Amino acid sequence: MLPLVIAHRGVPGERLEHTRPSYLLAIEQGADFIEPDVVSTSDGILVVRHENEIDGTTDVADRPEFADRKATKIVDGVSHTGWFTEDFTLAELKTLRCKERIPDLRPGNVALAGTEEILTLDEVLDIAETAGGEAPVGVYIETKHPSYFESIGISLNDMLIETLERRGFNDEDSTVVIQSFESANLRALRPRTPAMLVQLMSVEGQPADFTVAGDARTYDNLRSDEGLAFVAEYADAIGPFKELVVKPGAGPTGLVERAHAAGLDVHVWTMRNENAFLPPAMRVGTEKLAHGDAVSELLQFFDAGIDGAFSDFTSTAVQARSQWLQSQ
C-alpha cells in the first residue's frame, strides 16, 4: 500500500498551522490526510488548536477584554500559565486571530498574523469534503489531553463521536483517523467507531491516563512485543516519534517490522525541512531555519517500511514518495 502523506496541521512550514489556507494548500499539494488537533470550548464545541493553552498561537494576550481569563493550570502534570480554550465560548474564540507558533524558525509566516480565525472541527471536515474534489481527503484527528478534559467534566470522546455521527463519518467507509498519546480514550472509542485508531508514542514518559490510573507502564513498555500486542487489541497503528524508527547515524531500529508482526501500521512524526529538525548529516549550512535535505531523510523512512508520515511540508513529502516509488 502507498505510504500516506499526512499534512501535519496543514502545511505549517508555509502557512499558519491549523488555518484554512494551511489545510487548503496541503490538499492542493497532494496530502492524503489533513491533521487537526482538537480541544474544547466552554460551550462544548471542538476547535482546532495545537494546545488548549492559546497564548502561543493567537493574539489573546493582546486583547484587554480577556485579560481576566489568564490562569495557571496543571495539564498532564505540567503547570501552564496563559489562556485556555475551555474558558472561552466559541463566539469569543472566533474574535481572536492566529499567529505563528515558532517565529524564529518560520519568519515567513510572521506577517500572516491577524489574518485567520480559529477553526472548528466541523469547518475542517467541510474543507476536506469540499476541497478534495473527486478524491476525498481524509481527516486525521488528534484529541488533545483527554484525561485533563475528563477531569473538568468534558468528554472529548463523546463530542468527537457526536460530530462524526452527525456528519456521516462514523461508518466503515469513514475517511477519518483518530489518534492520541493516551490509551484509555482510544480503548473506550474502539467499540464506538470503525475509524482507524492510532496510538501515538513519545520517546520518554507514559500516557497521561496511565499516570492517572497508577499504571507504571511507559511508552517504552508499549514498544515492546508485549506492549505492541496490547496496543493491537484496540488500535490499528502506532504513531512513534521518527527517531524511534530510524535512529540518526544508526539506521532502522526494527520497530516497523515488530509493529507489522503485531498487525499494526506505523505512521511517524514529524518530518520537517528545517535544519533544526534534521539529523546532522542532512543539514545544509549552519542556520537552524535553513532547509536541509529533507527528501533524503524521508527516503530513509520509506525504505524502512513505514506506512505513513506526518509532515509540515506536504510538497516535500509527496516529492519524496514519488521519488521512492520510482526506485521500487
Image (cartoon, rainbow, N blue to C red):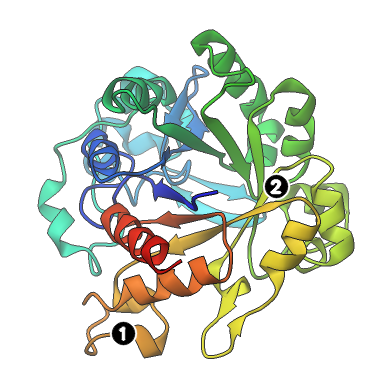
Q: Nearer the viewer, mark 1 or mark 2?
A: 1
- Residue 142 drawn at (x, y percent): 54, 40
Q: Quadrant of residue 63?
A: top left
- Residue 183 drawn at (x, y percent): 75, 45
Tell me the kind of residue under disc 2: Glu
Figure check: 92 above or below 203: above
Q: What residue is shown at x 25% (from left), y 53% (from top)?
A: 100
Near-viewer residue (314 or 219): 314
- Residue 232 drawn at (x, y percent): 80, 47
Tag 1 and tag 2, C-beta contact below 8 Å: no
Q: Residue furthest left?
A: 111
Query: Label 2 crowding class (10 Å Cα cut-off): few <14, some 14-19, many 20+?
Result: many
Q: What residue is shown at x 24% (from left), y 47% (from top)?
A: 16
Please name the residue that numbered disc 1 is placed on: 283
Give whichever of discs 1 and 2 has the lower sequence position: 2
Q: Quadrant of residue 216?
A: bottom right
